[in-house]
Image (cartoon, coloured by chain):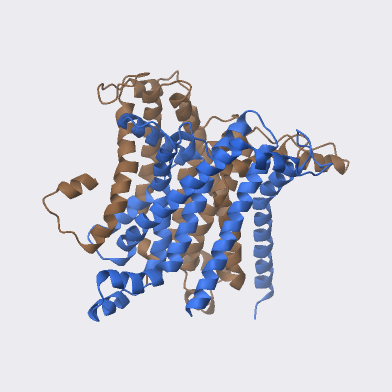
Amino acid sequence: MHTLGETRSRFLIRAWTAFVVLAIYLPIACGALAGLSKGRYFAFPVRVLSGEWWGKTWDSFEIHVLVQNSLLIALLVTVLSVLFAFFGALAFARYPWKGRRAFQRLLLLPIFFPQPVLGLALLLWFNALGISPTWKTAVVAHLVWIVPVVTLVIAIQVFSFDPVLEEAASDLGASRLFTLRTVTLPILWPGIWSGALFAFLLSWGNFPLSLYTAGADSTVPKWLYSKMVAGYTPMVPALGTMSTLAAAALLLAGGLIRILVRRRMR
Amino acid sequence: MAETLLSAPAPKLTPGLRAALPVLALLAAGFLAPLLTVAAYAFATPKSFDVFRSFTLENFAAIFDTNNTVWMSFAWALALAFACVVILLIVCYPIAYGLNRVFGRWSGLVSVLFVFPLFVSENVRLYGWVLFFIKNGVLDGALKWFGFPGGPELLYTPGITLFGMVYVYLPFMLFPMTLGIAMIPRDLVDAARDLGANRLMIWRAVELPLAMPGILIGALLTFVLSAGAVAESKILGGQSVITITQDIEAAFTYAQNWPLGSALALILVLIVSGLALAAMARLDLDKILGKR
């Protein structure tokens, strides 16, 4: 079917993609290696591998507090942003209304905005309101950026959804709530699920917003940064790798649950 | 904005507006209000916290003072952002094309591989590159092990800062571009080929114009994000280049000069949002996100 030239360009595209994927994961692998090597300073080739720093990181009380903060923020952000974004996505994609195009553009602005500047702007605003920054203000900051992302993710699902189904349900006498529960939610569920995963993971890994808006409360990325700038210990790559692996496990579990649910629904 | 909507003389609440209200309220309180605060601070007395109580142009005068070198930071940030966009356009196009046309049933998996790094804090990934490039690091150590004199000194240069930006913002170019290329109907390409167009002509006259909305979004997004980037120059670049966000941050932290920092931020925001709004006005988001 394919000409010789086409076969060659397909091969080049595959090779280039493989190269870029490798480059993307190379630094993550370097971090994993540094976290697993023995001794205070990293040197390659690694002479002795050991779980010493993983153990120390795992047992550290300071790290436990960080992980709790990060988890708490990420869980709250997930729940709240899915609630906001569910309705936001309906406004974005489902209903024809006058302000829709303006709404779509307004929604994109926080995504098209440098996050460090957004964090500083929020810090000024909280200060003007007399609120001292804590992990709670960090939740608000994360929401400003993550709600638009989740709205887009759910909106893509809404676009593929035929509003006639909802109308049919209400014509047949179903109440608003009943329609929502039995028609709208089951159809939009894959988008909502992906949106929730995105929300959790983006909040878990967020650094620039937490840096300025979490005040004295530290999160995992914030702590890692402070140690990178001053006072490196191999706990930095060890914790970085643990956090990466946790995110990967969650993404994998989320994908599996989605596949299982889809099978059961058929 | 939400307040004005609610207090306006009983506007008719269409289902669309009602569904939009929670998000509108969030953006009013968490996005527009902070930006207005920044704008207000930008006109406050330098090195004070007299926001809303004083009005002066001194901060802007200080920025545009010929003795001030802060324009260098703007120039660096915008130049690096521009270079980053150009490199990403070239790096991502083949991959975005592949995701649509070459990888077939593997493209889902390949996409996940490109999405996943977004969930790892950028400083963790950038620090991995430090471990790779540093003296006695992975590159240097490996070269020495093979008997070479050791790796080149790449860290703490403007070039590595650019590399870090390209690395961090790659997904933000790739995915809009992939959506854009997905908008090219295959039959159109086939038709052009049947009519005798060669591959370059097809690319220029058919594929590129049709994929343009997605490519434009990707370029805009990566430009805006990298113009405001700071972690790359701090972690990889070793502050060999001071970007504008770093100046803003310094004004807010060490210098405790919030009005000056706000004035700088305001200029950056005007550049960035001007670009974003100009480009977005020309896009049909319904079509890009796959409305049927």
Q: Position of residue B113 (x, y in %)?
A: 61, 59
In the image, taking residue A63 as reference, residue A95 lies left or right, namely left
- Is residue B123 visible in this depiction of the protein? yes
Q: Position of residue A101 (x, y in %)?
A: 29, 58
In the image, taking residue A232 as reference, residue A219 lies left or right, namely left
Q: Residue at x 32, y 60 (%)?
A: A87
Taking depth in this image into account, of B263 and A218 the one nearest to the observer is: A218
In the image, taking residue B136 as reference, residue B82 lies left or right, namely left
Taking depth in this image into account, of B194 and A89 the one nearest to the observer is: A89
Q: Residue at x 64, y 40 (%)?
A: B127
Q: Residue at x 28, y 59 (%)?
A: B19
Location of residue B58 (image quadrant)? top left
Drawing shade for chain B:
brown
Chain with colour blue in the figure: A
Q: Residue furthest right?
A: B147
Q: Position of residue B12 (x, y in %)?
A: 15, 59
Report the number of numbered marks: 0
Taking depth in this image into account, of A197 and A163 the one nearest to the observer is: A197
Q: Residue at x 28, y 69 (%)?
A: A177
